[in-house]
Amino acid sequence: MAIQNSYGALRSVYVRPPRLDDLAAWHEFGWHMAPDPGRAEHEHAALAAELERVGAEVVCGGTPVAGDPDAIYAYDATLPTDRGTILLR
């Protein structure tokens, strides 16, 4: 298996942009305050630019997850092993 850690050099990174319609459901998802849509878009663009600057391929997901503001978080905790990946809670 090619990946054995969560700290090595990034080669390819999957990101999801904030969708303004989805951010409206922030309260139902337990966020402490309403997000600033403009700031969210700016921070997403800055993150993607920084990832590209350090040499990572940025893959931007486009499939909507209607009404879910948490869909912008494309990372779930995992433990890569030689026999496969274990999904963590």
Image (cartoon, helix red, strand yellow):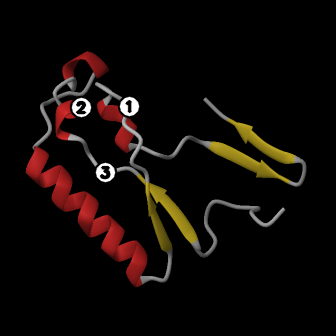
Q: Amino acid at mark 1?
A: Val
Lower sequence index among marks 3 and 1: 3
**Quarter of the figure that contains the N terminus:** bottom right
Mark 1 lies on a secondary structure that is loop
Q: State the mark number for residue 17.
A: 3
CA separation in Å, label 3 and label 1:
11 Å
Q: Residue at x 66, y 44 (%)?
A: 78
Q: Quadrant of the C terminus?
A: top right
Looking at the image, residue 10 lies above or below residue 32? below
Q: Left or right? Give the position of 29 relative to 63.
A: left
Q: Amino acid at mark 2?
A: Asp
User: What residue is drawn where x is 12% and y is 32%?
Assistant: 34
Distance, label 1 to label 2, CA atoms, is 8 Å
**Residue 71 located left or right of residue 30:** right
Residue drawn 10% across the image and 43% down it: 36
Residue 8 location (% of width, % of height): 64, 71
Quarter residue 7 falls in: bottom right
- In the picture of the structure, the residue carrying the numbered disc 1 is 65
User: 64 or 47, which is in the foreground?
Assistant: 64
Cβ–Cβ below 8 Å for labels 1 and 2?
yes
Q: Residue at x 63, y 60 (%)?
A: 6
Q: Is residue 85 left or right of residue 62?
A: right
Report the residue that reaches farthest toward the right.
83
Q: Is residue 37 above or below residue 48?
A: above
- Image-quadrant location for residue 41: bottom left
